[in-house]
Image (tube, helix red, strand yellow):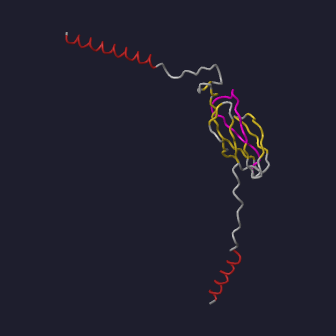
């Protein structure tokens, strides 16, 4: 009987003291880096893209760069989002450009978003592309296949001639 009372009191104490309702945890903090969004991943020199993202503190000043070069500042809206245009001049370096937006995150830490845009040459009247980075000639890559083929045919012919002469000597 005494053991039952002791067990009952233990259960009541455990329920009253140890079974507090679960407290809501703070939201997981936003990461300090992330992926921004561009409306087009490929653009021609002389055109613009819209670069956007979220997770910033409302009203935060956001510095935008292109391959590390400053391209301006924008401001996060009340929801912590931004959208800005980034334009590439007709003399922009062709190839991949890393856009970056950096400012105070919603959690108070510095937040950086990035996106990649590929810049192509300027459109010409004929619909082709024109190089904007140099003398207008493309670099030559690879080997001259015609020269290699000619050398291979000459070597095969010389080998066949040597084999024929060797067979003639054996039979003679």
Q: State which region is magenta.
A: 84-105
Q: Is residue 43 above or below residue 166?
A: below
What main secondary structure does the magenta stretch of the protein show? Answer: strand
Please state the total of marks drawn on the protein image. Answer: 0
Q: Is residue 1 above or below residue 60?
A: below
Which residue occupies the extreme bottom position in the image?
1
Q: Is residue 143 left or right of residue 44?
A: left
Query: In x, y percent, where is residue 19?
Result: 68, 74
Query: In x, y percent, where is residue 99?
Result: 69, 38
Is residue 116 part of the magenta span, yes or no?
no
Query: In x, y percent, where is residue 107?
Result: 75, 53
Which residue lies at the image location 63% right of the left edge and 39% below the top edge? 40
Name the one closer to the observer, 107 or 40: 40
Which residue lies at the image location 26% right of the left edge and 13% below the top edge? 164
Name the one closer to the observer, 8 or 71: 71
Name the one closer to the observer, 66 or 171: 66
Query: In x, y percent, where is residue 122?
Result: 64, 28
Q: Quadrant of residue 152?
A: top left
Quarter of the image that includes the N terminus? bottom right
Q: Quadrant of residue 168?
A: top left
Which residue lies at the image location 62% right of the left edge and 20% below the top edge? 136
Is residue 94 part of the magenta span, yes or no?
yes
Q: Is residue 12 left or right of residue 148?
A: right
Quarter of the image that includes the C terminus? top left
């Amino acid at each position: 009987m005494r053991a039952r009372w002791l067990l009952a009191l233990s259960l009541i104490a455990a329920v009253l003291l140890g079974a507090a309702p679960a407290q809501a945890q703070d939201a997981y903090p936003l990461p300090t880096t992330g992926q921004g969004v561009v409306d087009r991943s490929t653009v021609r020199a002389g055109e613009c893209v819209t670069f956007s993202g979220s997770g910033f503190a409302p009203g935060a000043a956001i510095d935008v760069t292109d391959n590390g070069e400053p391209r301006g500042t924008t401001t996060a809206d009340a929801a912590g989002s931004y959208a800005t245009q980034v334009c590439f001049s007709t003399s922009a370096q062709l190839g991949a450009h890393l856009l970056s937006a950096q400012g105070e995150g919603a959690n108070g830490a510095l937040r950086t978003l990035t996106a990649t845009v590929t810049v192509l040459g300027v459109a010409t009247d004929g619909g082709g592309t024109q190089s904007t980075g140099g003398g207008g000639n493309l670099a030559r890559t690879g080997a001259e296949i015609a020269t290699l083929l000619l050398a291979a045919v000459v070597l095969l012919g010389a080998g066949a001639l040597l084999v024929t002469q060797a067979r003639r000597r054996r039979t003679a």
